[in-house]
Amino acid sequence: MPDPRFSLANERTFLSWIRTSLALLAGGIAVEAFAVLDDPYRKGVAILLLILGMLISGGAFVRWIGVERAMRHQAPLPLPLIAPVLGVGAAAGALVVIVVIAMG
């Protein structure tokens, strides 16, 4: 049985990823609702943010379960795969916005 402090820390990390996911989902909805960019680009950015939010929330759950299992079996912790997904997704979104601004 792992120390409850580690389990609670794992839960706080999970909730932080969920908070990030909700922010991405809200951002995707806001981009689509407020028509900040031209139509095809706006939809692309909105869809990218929504997909990232979905992947982050699913990945957060998978990571939380994996870390809990590893702690209970005294095994090495799994590698974090959520951070690279978020980093690449954010870079792709920023690149789209930069291209749209440079062209407009």
Image (tube, rainbow, N blue to C red):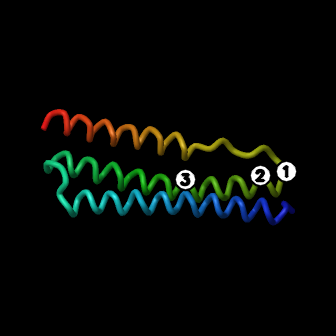
Q: Which residue is mark 1?
A: 74
Q: Residue at x 62, y 44 (%)?
A: 80
Q: Secondary structure at mark 3?
A: helix
**Labels 1 & 3 near each other (Cβ < 8 A):** no
Q: Which amino acid type is marked by label 2? A: Ala
- Mark closer to the chain start, 3 or 2: 3
Q: Residue at x 55, y 57 (%)?
A: 17
How far apart are labels 1 and 3 at the CA level? 22 Å
Give the quadrant of the N terminus: bottom right
Q: Which amino acid type is marked by label 3? A: Gly
Q: Which residue is mark 2?
A: 70
Neighbor class of circle 3 (other Cα within 10 Å; few <14, some 14-19, many 20+) is many
Q: Is residue 41 above or below residue 21?
A: above
Q: Secondary structure at mark 2?
A: helix
Q: Which residue is mark 3?
A: 59
Which quadrant holds residue 35? bottom left
Residue 11 numbered mark, or none? none
Neighbor class of circle 2 (other Cα within 10 Å; few <14, some 14-19, many 20+) is some
- Mark closer to the chain start, 1 or 3: 3
How far apart are labels 1 and 2 at the CA level? 6 Å
Q: Residue at x 49, y 43 (%)?
A: 85
- Residue 86, percent from left and from top: 47, 45
Q: Which amino acid type is marked by label 1? A: Gln
- Residue 71, percent from left and from top: 80, 54
Give the quadrant of the C terminus: top left
Which quadrant holds residue 22? bottom left
Left or right relative to 32: residue 90: right
**Labels 3 & 2 near each other (Cβ < 8 A):** no
Q: Residue at x 28, y 53 (%)?
A: 46
